[in-house]
Amino acid sequence: QSVLTQPPSVSGAPGQRVTISCTGSSSNIVATYDVHWYQQLPGTAPKLLIYGNTNRPSGVPDRFSGSKSGTSASLAITGLQAEDEADYYCQSYDSSLSAVVFGGGTKLTVL
Amino acid sequence: EVRLLESGGGLVQPGGSLRLSCAASGFTFSGYAMSWVRQAPGKGLEWVSTISSTGGYTYYADSVKGRFTFSRDNSKNTLYLQMNSLRAEDTAVYYCAKNLGAGTASLDFWGQGTLVTVSS
C-alpha cells in the first residue's frame, strides 16, 4: 500500500488531454514537500518528467505539466500521442516515515 | 552526457550477500547526492537509500535498514550498495540515480538497472 495514491490506470485517445492524480496526506504533499513525476516506458528506466511540482527538465515537451493543491498533485498530458503510453509515478517525501515515497504508479493507455 | 552504469547484480541465495556498483560519468560526481531505487518484477518503484554528496550522511528505507549499506568513492566516481541478509522480497531491478540537487528527492538521471534475484 503506497503512501501516495494514484489511479492504477487511465486512458485517452490521441490528441486528448488526460490527468493523473497523486493523493497524499499531511505528512507528505500537504506538508509542503515537493512532488515529482516520472515516466517509465516499457522495459526502460524511469525518466524525470516534472520536478518541484511544476517544473519541466530540459527536453520534456510542454505537453506535460504538473500542479499541486491541498492534499494532491496532478500530472496533465495534452495532445496525447501513442509514444506517451507508459507508466507514470509521483514521488515526494514523507516526514512521518522519514523516507522518500513513490505512488503506486499509473498505466497510461493511448487508445 | 551523464551516464550511470550499474553492475553486480545476479542470483543469490536467501541470507546471502551481494555488492552492487554504479559508475558515474559526465557530471561533477562529488557535488551531488545519489540514490538507489528498486523495482520488483511487475511492481512499482521503491526508494531504497540516499547518500549525501560527501558520503557523510546516508538514509535508508525501513525495509533495508540494518541490512544494506550505501557508500561512495568520490575519487573513483563510484557508488556501492552492500546488501546483506538478502530475502526473497529483495528481488528487483536496482537503479542508481542522481539527485537533482540539494534538498530535493527528485532524480534527474537514472542508470539502466541491474537485476538482483534472491532465490534458492
Image (spheres, coloured by chain):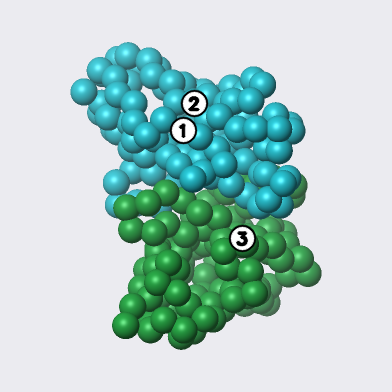
Chain colours: A cyan, B green
Q: Write the residue at 62% across / 29% down.
A: A53
Residue A105 visible in the shown view: yes
Tell me the element at label 3: loop
Instruction: Say if labels 3 and 1 share a chain.
Output: no
**Disc 2 chain ID:** A
Q: Residues at badges 1 and 2 in contact (C-beta under 8 Å)?
A: yes
Q: Residue at x 73, y 45 (%)?
A: A95
- Amino acid type at mark 1: Gln
| Res. B80 in view | no
Residue matched to label 3? B61
In the depicted structure, whether residue A36 falls above or below residue B66: above
Horizontal and vertical percent position of residue B88? 40, 72
Indicate the secondary structure of the residue bearing disc 2: strand
Is residue B120 shown above or below B110? Answer: below
Residue A40 sits in which quadrant? Answer: top left
Q: Is residue B116 above or below residue A35?
A: below
Q: Which residue is mark 1?
A: A6
Look at label 2 and name its amino acid: Ser
Q: Position of residue A92 (x, y in %)?
A: 62, 41
The residue carrying pointer 3 sits among few (fewer than 14), some (14 to 19) or many (20 or more) residues within 10 Å by Cα, namely: some
Q: Chain of mark 3?
A: B
Q: Find out whether the residues at labels 3 and 1 contact each other: C-beta distance under 8 Å.
A: no
Give the Cα distance between marks 3 and 1: 21 Å
Q: Which residue is mark 2?
A: A21
| Chain holding disc 1 | A
Alpha carbon distance from label 1 to label 2:
6 Å
- Left or right side of A77 for A31: right
Residue A33's quadrant in the figure? top right
The location of residue B69, given as percent across then percent down, is 63, 75
**Could you tell me which residue is drawn at 30 percent across and 15 percent down?**
A15
Left/right placement of residue A35 relative to residue B8 reads right
